[in-house]
Amino acid sequence: MEKSGRPEKKRLFGLSLLLSMLVLILEGMLALVVAVVYGITQESPNAGGGSAMFILFLPVVAVFGIMVAGAASVALVFPAAWLGDVLGRRLGGREVWWWVPPAAAVVSLVPVGSVVAAYGGADPATAAAGWFFTTVAITVPALLWRSRRERIFKPVTLWGVAAVVLTAVLGGVGLATGVLKEYRPPALTSADIVGHWSDGQGGTVTFTADGRVTAVDVDDDLDGWGPEDDATDPDDPEDADTGCSGQGTWTYEPGGGTWSQEVDLTIDSCDFDVWNVGGTANRPTLYQYIGDPDSGDLYVLRRTDADAGS
């Protein structure tokens, strides 16, 4: 095609690469804002210090993000833009933008399929959603990659930043007005603690109304414990007896709010930290952190069905 008597010039590969990286970084920022707002509405532990640690690692995250954006631009965005042009020429006689989304859908099958294969399969709905969002994420920079428009960096940056800021503002307003429900642990009382609790792996704790507690095979050595340590090796002396059993007393401390509720167990044969309150009003949980609280790994006790329904 010609415009004003002159053929349109293609953007240099290096500039197209930078533009693609810019778009992918903006998309990543937008996804991060959505993930944070969504995470606030979902049940989660109060992993104190996590936000501060994230801020400290922001420079590392930024460098990593730039590297990922560059690699994704070369490995995914450029092939999608190229394939879209090839399809346009072969099937329509000219390069047109509407071949880019189908090309991006084909290219996105590679990373999505790799992830599904690496994790031994996935729920079809989850895989389909991942494929759709990956396709969208590739399509936008691929369309801009093949654009001939000059001076495009400024409007892309302004519109991208505006979308991120607007999303953050809408999310904040939604949380502040209650349209989006912020998760908070249920407000319990001592009476809510009374009953039988289980870790789902044979460990149980029974609280009675008179302040007594009985523990059976409850893990009390969580400093070096990880999810991969679910099973113990009877031939290993260190794993011969990882469960704690005994009787003692318990107290419930409401603290200054739902996040600071604590249940303290005192059993001579056990070495427990205080238990935090989580879950929901219908399904409360008691949990302790496994190792570093920033890891998010939890050792959880749940009410048995008989108690939960009482």
Image: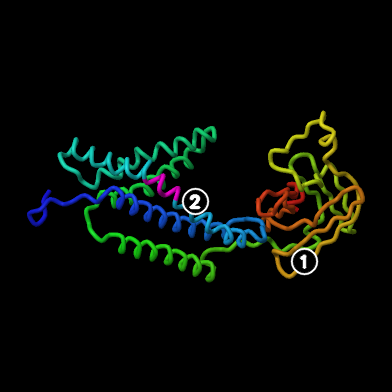
> Which residue in the structure is indicated by mark 2?
64
In the rendered structure, the answer to whether residue 105 lies left or right of residue 261 reads left
Between circles 1 and 2, the one closer to the viewer is 2
The residue tagged with tag 2: helix, strand or loop? helix
Residue at 45 percent across and 44 percent down: it is 130
Label 1 residue SS: loop
Q: Residue at x 38, y 66 (%)?
A: 162
Q: Which residues lie in the magenta part?
A: 67-73
Quick one: label 1 or label 2, which is nearer the N terminus?
2
**Amino acid under disc 2:** Phe
Does 215 lie within the magenta span? Answer: no
The residue located at (91%, 49%) in the rendering is: 247
Residue 289 appears left or right of 19:
right
Q: Residue at x 83, y 41 (%)?
A: 243
Magenta stretch mostly in which secondary structure? helix
Q: Nearer the viewer, residue 117 or 61?
A: 61
Classed neighbour count for the residue bearing mark 1: other residues with Cα under 10 Å, few (<14), some (14–19), many (≥20): some
CA gap, disc 1 and disc 2? 42 Å
Residue at image mark 1: 254
Mark 1 and mark 2 in contact? Answer it, CB < 8 Å. Answer: no
Give coordinates of residue 260: x percent, y percent.
73, 64
Q: Nearer the viewer, residue 65 or 279?
A: 65
